Amino acid sequence: NQITKSTLCALLACQAMVESAAAAGQSSSARKSGVPVFVMMPLDTVKTCCGSGLNHRKTMARDLAALKSSGVEGIMVGVWWGVVEGEEPGLYNFEGYMKLVEMARDARLKVQAVMSFHQCGGNVGDTVNIPLPRWVVEEMDKDQDLAYTDQCGRRSYEYVSLGCDDMPVLDGRTPIRCYTDFMRAFRDHFAAFLGDATDRAHAGLGKN
């Protein structure tokens, strides 16, 4: 998806903070040669019902240790909008992701976080389903022009249409403001890990 200028600026600011923190703590010795490998975590790593815990936590530490011993640099995980801000606008629950980052740090693995502002699953063969936040879906039910529509008139609730990026249609906020607030909340919650355990942040807005 195309990203508007204000969203890109917010993401770049978040990324700059990560990189500056990493540079501050980096030793003068040369970095190891080779291409760093990051392994994508399962889509349902964090419990989707409330975002407060991890699925398969008992085996998680063992699996992370195995990744480290195999030479992996870190892990990548989707930070789902529908999990973190699923119930109420402006109410963020990063608890499950915090537990994961702490476990990755203990295993000496880095974490790349993908801010995922789209639906997960919901299609044929998908085993994980994480819809958009409940309050976003309610607004889309009221005004279906917030959703993408195909030539047959079918609406897609996988992501909010770029056509309303700058319109205050989500509980008085624009989608761009929602994404920006989410990324700022992530930055604030994980400030102690930026540049250390948290290596990089990306923004995901669904299919191209």
Image (tube, helix red, strand yellow):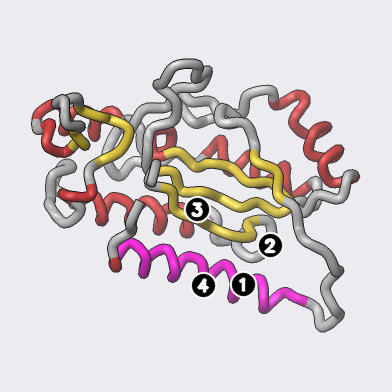
The numbered mark, 1 or 4, whose residue comes first in the sequence reads: 4
Residue density around tag 2, few if under 14, some if 14–19, many if 20 or more, within 10 Å = many
Residue at image mark 4: 16
Residue pictured at 43% horizontal, 48% vertical: 204
Q: Position of residue 40 (x, y in %)?
A: 65, 41
Q: How many angstroms separate mark 3 from mark 1 (CA)?
A: 15 Å
Residue density around tag 3, few if under 14, some if 14–19, many if 20 or more, within 10 Å = some
Query: Which type of secondary structure does the marked residue at label 3 adopt?
Result: helix
The numbered mark, 3 or 4, whose residue comes first in the sequence reads: 4
| Callouts 3 and 4 close, C-beta under 8 Å | no
> Which residue sits furthest bottom?
28
Amino acid residing under circle 3: His
**Region rendered in magenta:** 6-26
Residue at image mark 1: 21
Residue at image mark 3: 189
Q: How many angstroms separate mark 2 from mark 3 (CA)?
A: 14 Å
Residue at image mark 2: 196
Q: Main secondary structure of the magenta part?
A: helix
